[in-house]
Amino acid sequence: MVEKIELAIIDDDREFCEIMEEFFVGREDFSLTGIANEAEAGIELVKKKKPDALVLDLIMPEKDGVEVLKQLKEMNLHTEIKIVVLTAFGKEKIIKEVSKLGADYYIMKPFSLEKLADRLIQLQGKDDDYSIPKEVNLLKDKDFNEEEESEPDIEVQISEVLHRLGVPAHIKGYLYLREAIKLVVEDIQKMGAVTKELYPSVADNFETTPSRVERAIRHAIDVAWEKGEKEEVKNYFGNTLTSSSGKPTNSQFIAKIADRLRLEMKK
């Protein structure tokens, strides 16, 4: 009989939690002990259940993942649990801080749930072919963070902007937006042919269709407009919108962020 890894999840994104729940419940090597959508409930969950592993989102309202780690350390629970933190962007200062607070691994969103499961297994020492040293360097594992290690600075900057604007990192529109903005930053002429050049270029990179790219980006912008930080939205778009809905069109959204990033790069 397979020895199950008891797993807890703390993440305020309910939709993403449902995706993770469905994934882990379907595996015979994991037992999902509970999910919390805010920090205090998550801390109580860990205190009560004392799981083998914890998946913790760093960015949450009211109290973030860093505060959760601090409280777990104060209760001396950080040494008993393997902790993987999730983040939309990986600044070295933050990564060092969470490592000191007891985090064993960090994962850049978006990520593969299969790889997350693999690393949770390896952190428990249940994979004889792979061992992770208990050092800060484990947060730099090239195999797991292959995308991040090869990711140029511009993609990190775009990820940070999308995060601040409230675009969820786990939806397809996030990936398509990031790629579209990157392409426009590299070649501003693509904004003159969004339908004929930009969407097809993004679609080719993700093996999908231009129409699906357009719809997914539209959905991502709608989500950001409904649930994102209003001050950040105002900071980026101000009174420049011309669409009747009051929301930026796909082209306006991409062009505005790309233009801002191009100006920052020049500085």
Image (cartoon, grey):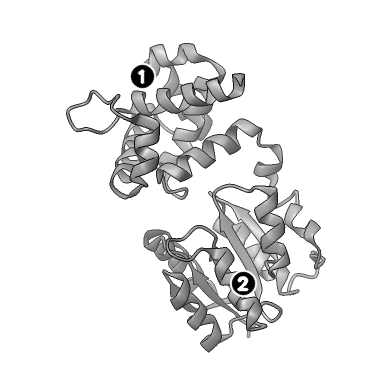
The image position of residue 2, as x and y in percent, is 63, 82
2 or 1: tag closer to the N-terminus: 2
Q: Residue furthest left?
A: 244
Say what amino acid the circle numbered 2 marks: Lys
Above or below 146: residue 204: above
Q: From the image, tell me which residue sits under label 2.
A: 70
Q: Where is residue 248 in the image (x, y as percent from the top left)?
A: 30, 30
Q: Name the residue under label 1.
A: 195
Q: Where is residue 73 in the image (x, y as percent from the top left)?
A: 66, 77
Q: Considering depth in this image, is 128 or 214 the residue closer to the camera?
A: 214
* Disc 2 secondary structure class: helix
Asked if labels 1 and 2 touch by Cβ distance under 8 angstroms, the answer is no
Q: Is residue 49 left or right of residue 243?
A: right
Q: Is residue 190 above or below residue 176?
A: above
Q: Which residue is drawn at 34% across and 24% down?
A: 252
- Nearest to the observer: residue 8 or residue 72: 72
Q: Which amino acid does label 1 sit on?
A: Thr
Q: Is residue 146 left or right of residue 219?
A: right
Q: Position of residue 21 (x, y in %)?
A: 45, 69
